[in-house]
Amino acid sequence: TELRSTTFCNLCCYFRGRGKHNAALQFAEKAVRIDKQHKDAEDPGRLRLNYAVLLSLMGRHEEAVEQIEAGAALFREEERHLRQRNDSWEEASGTRTAEQVAMCLVVAYHNLWVEHHSLSRKEAAGHCLFR
C-alpha cells in the first residue's frame, strides 16, 4: 500500500504541474485515503501539505486549513522524536534532520497563514507567524 500511496502522490504532483488540478486533487485524495487507512505513507506530512495546496486552489480553504494542521502535527511529532533520540541535527537513515523538519514546519505555518488570510481570519493568521 505504501507503493500505491507514493504512486498516487507522484501522479498528483505530475498533474498539478500540468495545470490539471482536478486530476491532481483526485490522486491526492486517494493517497490521503490510503494513508488514513494504513498509516504507511512515505511522507504523510508533505502529502497533507500538497493536498492542502490543491484544496486551496479549488477554493476549499476550510479543508485546506484542516490538512495543513494535520501535516504540521505530523512534523511536530517527527521533531519531538528527533529531540528524544538526541540526534536532532544528524541525519539518520531514512529520516529527515531536525533542520529539514523545521523547514517543513515553516512551509506549513506560512501556508496556514495564507489560508486564514483567505478566510479573513486576521487574528488566526497572525498567530501562525509567531509559531
Image (cartoon, helix red, strand yellow):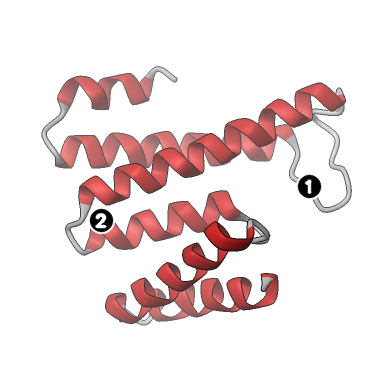
Point out residue 30 in the picture as x, y percentages from the top left corner: 46, 73
Mark 2–mark 1 contact, CB under 8 Å?
no
Determine which residue is flagged by label 2: 56
What secondary structure is found at the residue carrying circle 2? Answer: helix
Which residue appears at 52% of the width and 35% of the height?
73
Residue at the image position 47 percent from the left and 53 percent from the top: 48
**Residue drawn at 59 percent across, 71 percent down:** 5
What crowding class fits label 1: few (fewer than 14 Cα within 10 Å), some (14-19), or many (20 or more)? few
Instruction: Specify whether 77 is left or right of 70.
Output: right
| Quadrant, the N terminus | bottom right
Q: State the residue position of label 1.
A: 95
Q: Position of residue 39 (x, y in %)?
A: 63, 56
Upstream in sequence: badge 2 or badge 1: 2
- What residue lies at 69% left-to-right and 26% top-to-bottom? 80
Q: CA distance from mark 2 to mark 1?
A: 28 Å
The disc at residue 58 is none
